[in-house]
Image: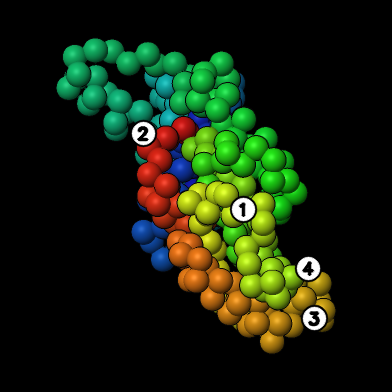
Amino acid sequence: MEARTVFFVSDGTGITAETFGHSVLTQFDLRFKQIRLPFIDTLAKAHNAVREINHSFEKDGKRPIVFSTLVKANLSAVIRLSKGMHMDLIHTFVEPLEQELGVKSTHTIGRSHNIADSDAYKNRIEAINFSLAHDDGQSDKNLTAADVILVGVSRSGKTPTSLYLAMQYGIKAANYPLIPEDFERDKLPSGLLPFKSKIFGLSIAPDRLSEVRNERRPGSKYAALENCRYEVNEAEKMMRREGIRWTSSTAKSIEEIATMILQEIKSDRRFY
């Protein structure tokens, strides 16, 4: 089936419209061609957006779906003239809340992501820097400041999960690979022992691990299925023996893994 075109139109970054739109679109087992139109903050840009939406309609023969978070009513009115199926998130949610709360909203463009001077933003930047400095076992300095330490075999998803936790939630996440030398010693890396209560483990199915590693080092021992089976088995055995909480990343998204970790470390921080 041909993909349906979807536009995310915003007077800011478009992240809010895209995030909401993705949540809705995942309920449909269809393919979507997704186009973000950010910073539509003038009438000229709004009319250009309409032309692009209308061109998609003429080319596809089907109405594009338009998710909009335009704050200014005059810009939103222009976009509504397009030949798309219009989903206005401001109109749908903000106006009813204004009535319920008895106050007018700020109607500030890009407010949800304009937080460069806030403590939350600074915390996220600090967390990102921390996670980068402690990626892949680069350093065991200042681990007392870590909120969580991820361990697992190489390519089990530690780095993307660490960075997601830092960027989305301001969580300082270090990550360490479990390597054959650790399995031979039958011990965790010595630098982690004082912080065992902060450790969370990631595992992965050996066949999937082999696929991922072959993309990086095709035909190597590192990527061989038998070696992957050995490393995964030894890592899981070590985590069970050490009483480390862990989960498999094989069929889980980064978002799901991060949510599990947040529940385990009892963090109530939410920085968007």
Between 127 and 42, the residue placed more toward the observer is 127
When asked about the image quadrant of residue 205, the answer is bottom right
Residue 197 in percent (x, y) is at 48, 51
Q: Earlier in the sequence, mark 1 or mark 2?
A: 2
Q: Earlier in the sequence, mark 3 or mark 2?
A: 2
Question: Could you tell me how far apart the alpha carbons at marks 4 and 1 are, in whole angstroms?
Answer: 27 Å
Question: Could you tell me how far apart the alpha carbons at marks 2 and 4 are, in whole angstroms?
Answer: 42 Å
Residue 66 in percent (x, y) is at 45, 41
Question: Could you tell me how far apart the alpha carbons at marks 1 and 2 are, in whole angstroms?
Answer: 46 Å
Q: Earlier in the sequence, mark 3 or mark 4?
A: 4
Question: Could you tell me how far apart the alpha carbons at marks 3 and 2 are, in whole angstroms?
Answer: 52 Å
Looking at the image, can residue 78 be seen?
A: no
Q: Which residue is mark 1?
A: 192
Residue at left offset 24%, top offset 24%: 97
Q: Which residue is mark 4?
A: 216
Frontmost of labels 2 and 4 is: 4
Q: Earlier in the sequence, mark 4 or mark 1?
A: 1
Determine the secondary structure under disc 1: helix
Residue 229 in percent (x, y) is at 63, 83
Q: Earlier in the sequence, mark 2 or mark 4?
A: 2
- The amino acid type of the residue labelled 1 equals Leu
Q: Which residue is mark 2?
A: 89
- The amino acid type of the residue labelled 2 equals Leu
Q: Which mark is residue 221?
A: 3
- The amino acid type of the residue labelled 4 equals Arg
Residue at left offset 42%, top offset 22%: 71
Between 23 and 211, the residue placed more toward the observer is 211
Determine the secondary structure under disc 4: helix
